[in-house]
Image (cartoon, rainbow, N blue to C red):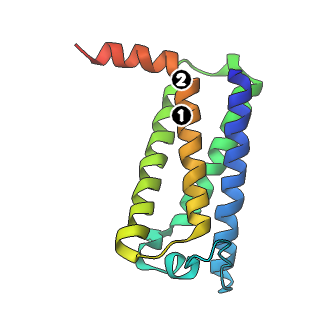
Amino acid sequence: MEGALKLIIAALAFVGFLIAGYIHVTKKNASPLVCPLEGSCDAVIHSDQSSLFGIPVELLGSAYYALMAVVYVFFFLFPSMLHEWFPYSLLVVTALAFIFSLYLTAVQAFVLKHWCTWCLFSASICVMMFLITIIVMKGELITILGALLP
């Protein structure tokens, strides 16, 4: 079961990479981004909030998703080669991506007041990856929380 969940995370990451890549290529080519559910994708991806420290958010997403896809496939194929701290680093990275995704969704809702369907698909993928990571790490999380709580 755990191995299948790792492959599901890798597959989700690959789909997220494709979505982020589609957004980036469309934005770079100055083509209109087709929003599948009648959102305002162009208003979102061309907003001032579409980059962080000058880096387009979709490139950050592409890097995250590519890293997760490669790491989880490697994690699935060669579990004995990984250090014991490695799953914890995946949990931290996935949690940070989840929090950033929540932030970007809040920006769409409260600042831009426009929705990008592709961005919401990406956010949904990020949420699923985070939840599955928690499921995969449940035993380790209980150990960590037990050590942290008095």
Residue 134 versus residue 55 in the image, above or below:
above
- The residue that disc 1 covers is 90
Left or right for 1, reference 40: right
- Image location of residue 7, percent across then percent down: 74, 34
Q: Nearer the viewer, mark 1 or mark 2?
A: 2
Within-10-Å neighbours for mark 2: few <14, some 14–19, many 20+: some
Dividing the picture into quadrants, the one containing residue 132 is top right
Residue annotated with mark 2 = 137
Q: Secondary structure at mark 2?
A: loop
Q: Is residue 117 in view from this perspective?
A: yes
On the image, the x and y values in percent for residue 103 come to 39, 58
Residue sticking out furthest to the left: 150
Q: Earlier in the sequence, mark 1 or mark 2?
A: 1
What SS does tag 1 mark? helix
- Going by the numbered disc 2, the residue's amino acid type is Met
Seen at 45% across and 36% down, the residue is: 92
Q: Is residue 117 left or right of residue 105?
A: right
Give me the C-alpha separation between circle 1 and circle 2: 10 Å
Q: Nearer the viewer, residue 17 or 134?
A: 134
Residue 139's place in the image compared with 14, above or below, is above
Badge 1 vs badge 2, beta-carbon distance below 8 Å:
yes
Q: Which residue: 57% across, 81% down?
A: 42
Determine crowd level at label 1: few under 14, some 14-19, many 20+ residues with C-alpha closer than 10 A.
Answer: some
